[in-house]
Image (cartoon, grey):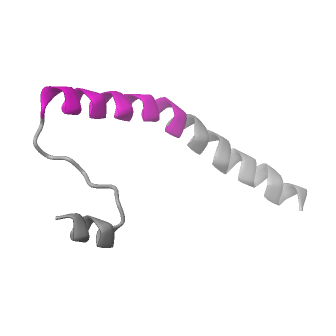
């Protein structure tokens, strides 16, 4: 049981660190695209709502 907890910690903690480090970089890149007026915009709404609004 304790081995599973230790293994899980070794798998999850590095993943959390990587996500934390790269999330700021990804958000900054997104902000730069929005400010630059790049025409491509990802619609994150539900596909059905997206379809109904177009």
Q: Is 42 or 5 nearer to us in this picture?
A: 42
User: What segment is highlighted magenta in the picture?
Assistant: 19-37
Percent x, y of residue 11 = 65, 50
Residue 32 in magenta stretch: yes
Q: In which quadrant will I find the N terminus?
A: bottom right
Residue at x-position 43% and y-position 29%: 24
Query: Relative to 17, does residue 51 appear above or below in the rendering?
Result: below
Drawn side of residue 49 relative to residue 18, left or right: left
The residue sitting at the right extreme is 1
Q: Is 20 or 4 nearer to us in this picture?
A: 20
The residue sitting at the front extreme is 53
Query: Relative to 17, does residue 3 appear above or below in the rendering?
Result: below
To which quarter of the image does residue 16 belong?
top right
Residue 27 in magenta stretch: yes
Query: Relative to 11, does residue 38 appear above or below in the rendering?
Result: above
Drawn side of residue 27 relative to residue 1, left or right: left
Residue at x-position 49% and y-position 30%: 21
Tally of numbered discs: 0
Drawn side of residue 45 relative to residue 54, left or right: right
Q: Is 50 or 24 nearer to us in this picture?
A: 50
Q: In which quadrant will I find the C terminus?
A: bottom left
Majority secondary structure in the magenta region: helix
Residue at x-position 36% and y-position 35%: 26
Drawn side of residue 14 relative to residue 28, left or right: right
Percent x, y of residue 47 = 30, 69
Percent x, y of residue 9 = 74, 47
Percent x, y of residue 45 = 34, 59
Residue at x-position 26% and y-position 65%: 50
């Amino acid at each position: 049981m304790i081995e599973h907890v230790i293994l899980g910690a070794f798998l999850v903690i590095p993943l959390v660190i990587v996500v934390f480090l790269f999330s700021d970089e990804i958000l900054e890149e997104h902000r730069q695209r929005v400010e630059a007026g790049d025409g491509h915009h990802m619609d994150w709404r539900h596909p059905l709502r997206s379809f109904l609004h177009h």
